[in-house]
Amino acid sequence: MNLTKDKTGVMTTARKGWNPRLVVFACNWCSYAGADTAGVSRIQHQPHFRMIRVMCSGRIQPGFVLRAFEKGADGVLVSGCHFGDCHYVFGNEKAVEQFEKTKSVVKMLGLEEGRLRLEWISAAEGARFAQVIDEFIEQLRELGPSPLSRARSGDEAAGALTPEAEEVEARV
Amino acid sequence: MTGCEGEPGDFTISVRKHPRYVREDLCVACGLCVDACPQVGGNEFDQGLKARKAIYRPFPQSVPATYVIDREACLNDQILYCQHCMDACDVNAIDFDMLPEDVELRVGSVIVAVGFQEFDARKLGNYGYGRFPNVVTSLELERMLNASGVTQGHVIRPSDGKTPRRIVFVQCVGARGEGGRPYCSRFCCMNAVKDSMLLRQHDPDVEEVTVLYTDMRAFGKGFDDFVKRSLEEQSANYLRGRPAKIEEVAGGNLEVFVEDTLGHEQRRVPADLVVLSVAAAPNDAAPKLAETLGIETDRYGFMARLDPAISAVETSRDGVYVCGSAVGPQVIPDCVAQASAAAARAQLYLTGERVEQTEARAEPMDLSGPPRVGVLVCHCGVNIGGVLDVDALAAEAGSLPGVVAAKTHLFACSTAGQEEMVELVREHDLNRVVVAACTPRTHEPVFREGLAQIGFNPYLLEMVNIRDQCSWVHAREPDAAQEKARALIRMGVARSRHLEPLQESKAPMTRSALVVGGGIAGIQAATDLAVQGFPVTLVEKQGRLGGRLAAPHLKYLYPNMRLAAEVLEEKLDRLRRSGARVLLKTEVADVRGFVGSFEADLAGPVPETLPVGAIILAIGADLHDPQGEFGYGELTNVITSDELERVFCESESEAPIKGERPSSASFILCVGSREAEGSCTGCSRYCCPTAIKQAMLLVRRGIDATIFYRDIRTVSGGAEEMYREARGMGVLFVRVPPDRKPEVVGDGRAEAIRCHDELLNRTVEVPTDLVVLSVGMRPRQPDTKRLHEMLKASVGLDGFFLERHPELAPVETAVEGVLLAGTAQGPKDIVDSVAQASAAAAKASVFLAHDEVTLDPAVAHVEQERCRACGECVEICQFHAPALVATADGGYAAEINASLCKGCGTCASWCPSGAITCRHFTDRQITAQIDAFFAEEAAS
């Protein structure tokens, strides 16, 4: 699949009035709390994401992220506490290791790296949470719909999955 | 309350209960009587802005939810036999013959929390309140801005119902000198800032908000950052000046005559609506109540405390305690801390009769069988309902797989809402409940408790956050917000179908506490716990107790120049008598464990390992080191406020200061506080009154004193009066702009302060022999960092320990059993530190009062048949919860110690064979949520 061509080809139609679907996995103690802080401070941000709360970002195994992409997500954000701030000491460092694994599989699926993000947001950083969401959603608008979701919805422009990608998708 | 006889520990309280003419035991709060009542009057709760009937509920969340008849207004007393309400009532709860009832209560102690009432702005005729309809009070505005209030959050002009475009706030109405009240009302500055932001967000028609202020008193934790945001978002113009008068012009519009003291011009500010930020005044009924209780009131009529530096809550009568705004204006976090402090003191006379968990839990309900989900969608007034179509959400939820009932409620967390939830469970045999409301982080416990009371397993509840993370943050895009709420509910319902009932277990509680830090806060916390009979160990790394209260740090306390040594001596005496164990020159080297069974390694003259159930962090704060700022370190006569305090401690009145006998001194405030950037953006709270106190002491020595300030923040009790006294004594105050700091002029020695005087609007140069830098507070290092690493108690952006919630849990941390006292949590003065320390002690005693601690069952679990005993989980867990154990078939498998497991779920995501389940966050539950996000599109 030729990503660049594909990307530009789809972008012009996709960006107009198109909203990406972003799944956010957030830890209870920092990032989910940070999103609440944004709420308490009424910091407005883009609505095109859905939050899944877990206790620790270390809980996020590659399967969850891949499942989200498989089902039609255009982007996935994994978010936890800053280093040294993890409620469970090193859960976020484990999250990084998991994330690296996830990234390599996402690559194999033929998805752009820019669809997957790992961010550290503390309970106090409501404004930062809003900013990360806004930036990421803009970035996903640039990228356009995920090739996986386009493939599933029969979008011709999307082209087919690479053979490796098909194999991986079958596994997840 | 009509009488209070007896002794502490055994009071007899007489109470006269006025008749409500509706029987509490019969009324079902259906509201039919209200519909039937023909008589309409002003609703007191809504400041008379909204109507109520003669039979009414005082406010929507009143407890009990029983109606009451206003006999003054009731037609039954005016036109014979109106009795519409009696006819309407299906349960015959109306009883016009009800008589006042005298009740006697036997109690051990009394807490007075009668609050304040607002200053009557009619007393200030020049503001026109009461004459001009469009001059309203801050409380009236609050009722309009309130989602469940008069206008459902829309602000209107009382004269014509139009949305005001230009709104002017007048600060300090009835405070700081007007109307005979010299004190500062503490909360009004932040309230006006908050309202300006709400107004601008809520109503696009509001074009301009102007706040007329004198000093911006953003003294609390995070307050300055909030003001900064208001400035960045331009929610209001801040104009420094106190209006001379307000006049009405054509069409109900107003003109505010004010001198802009920074813009240096007389102005007439046009306004469609003027909001008077009215001060807190003592409750009218306070003097009579005080007399009944045999306690004193202060010169204004607030409840008097014996000595706030000694105890935040003690009155002149033992066993009677006061808290909150009954003692003077307060902000909510301070009220909450004081209230806990009062509870701690009140417990002293309840020892031996400590209230165990009283309510008998119902038998567990049988919740087996396929999921039968009930959904309750909350309006939260207009917090949710103002943005989202709640009825549509409920209607759609009703059609989701597994859902058998879906309803809405105005306030799901209210007693009525909880009852509705319980009713829903019973009526539809539910075995799953989904509440779509606010954040589970604050309200999951509330709904879990409501369900637990009827024996419904609380882990079968799922909360969907459609307020904090939806209606509040996507208010400008209601359609997209609705879409998001629909998806979130879909996801929550999907998850709920896979929830499993979990049983809480118990672990032993070591009924003793460790207090870290022997300053005023640590002393207070240790004393409070020890007098209740709990074993307490107080560790202090220095060789003496007292922290900053002890010489050579502090000689006199503001506002009344009490000797710090006297206060400390009394505190130490109380500590000694309490029986607390004190270890000096001792530090905490390491801490392991969790609430109920912490183990602390103490490094001191005699090292030991101490088992404790709870830990109070009272490590205090450092002072900012101003090296290189304002010539400190280079110019010989530039010193810090702390160094000046040492001079007071060490010498009598005529002694030299730094070897000199200065004839003039200059104080520079906010050194290392309220910085534009970085971690020191907050106010240090103690410096303004301290500088004024020090300036007054210098003036008494014949030294001229000038204070260079940005805002004078004399908010603590008596401090504003001291500020006035200082001005009367001739202390000079020069206001400088925040972005142009004063400059110290001199070579080798400071000779003058050069700055822009904002009030004179020109550069001035004030000759000086001495420069005193009022240095701010900093988190104490390396102690804060070390304890943070050991205990995992969070630290905020300012570097101080972070409270779990500023209003709901001001002394708790996110780590259960670890509490905060004093300046470890943020800058405070002695009175506030003492109050907070007592609050921390009260919270610790909640844990220590029980033999056991309840363990969260939402932890990891190993399915041993699938475990290959690879040991990965044992390796990665920081809490040493998993261990490899021998199995019955001679092999090995991992096992998780539930009391060590914190439920992070990292091992579950790590386990290569999928043998570990993270309860309450299982693979299946999370996957169901992911799938449900996209389920709609898949179906269509």
Image (spheres, rainbow, N blue to C red):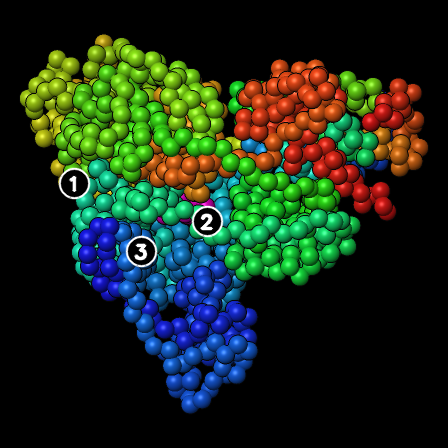
Q: Is residue B17 left or right of residue B388?
A: left
Q: Residue at x 78, y 31 (%)?
A: A67
Query: Which labelled disc corresponds to residue B725?
Result: 1
Q: CA distance from mark 1 to mark 3?
A: 30 Å
Q: Position of residue A59 (x, y in %)?
A: 66, 27
> Where, quadrant-wise, is the C terminus of chain A in this rendering?
top right
Q: Secondary structure at mark 2?
A: helix
Instruction: Decide which of tag 3 and tag 2 comes sooner along the chain.
Output: 3
Q: Residue at x 27, y 51 (%)?
A: B109
Q: Is residue B783 above or below residue B140?
A: above
Three-letter code, disc 2: Asp
Badge 1, how many Cα within 10 Å: few under 14, some, many 20+?
A: some
Residue B92's spot in the image, x, y percent? 50, 79
* Circle 3 SS class: loop
Q: Are the residues under badges 1 and 2 in a single subunit?
A: yes
Secondary structure mainly formed by the magenta segment: helix
Residue appearing at x 46%, y 49% in the figure: B195
For residue A8, above or below residue B781: below
Query: Marks 2 and 1: in contact by CB < 8 Å?
Result: no
User: How far apart in space, not on screen, are marks 3 and 2 (Cα)?
Assistant: 25 Å
Residue at the spot of label 3: B114
Q: Nearer the viewer, mark 3 or mark 2?
A: 3
Residue designated by label 2: B195
**Range drawn in magenta:** B187-195
Tell me the number on the disc at residue B932. Answer: none
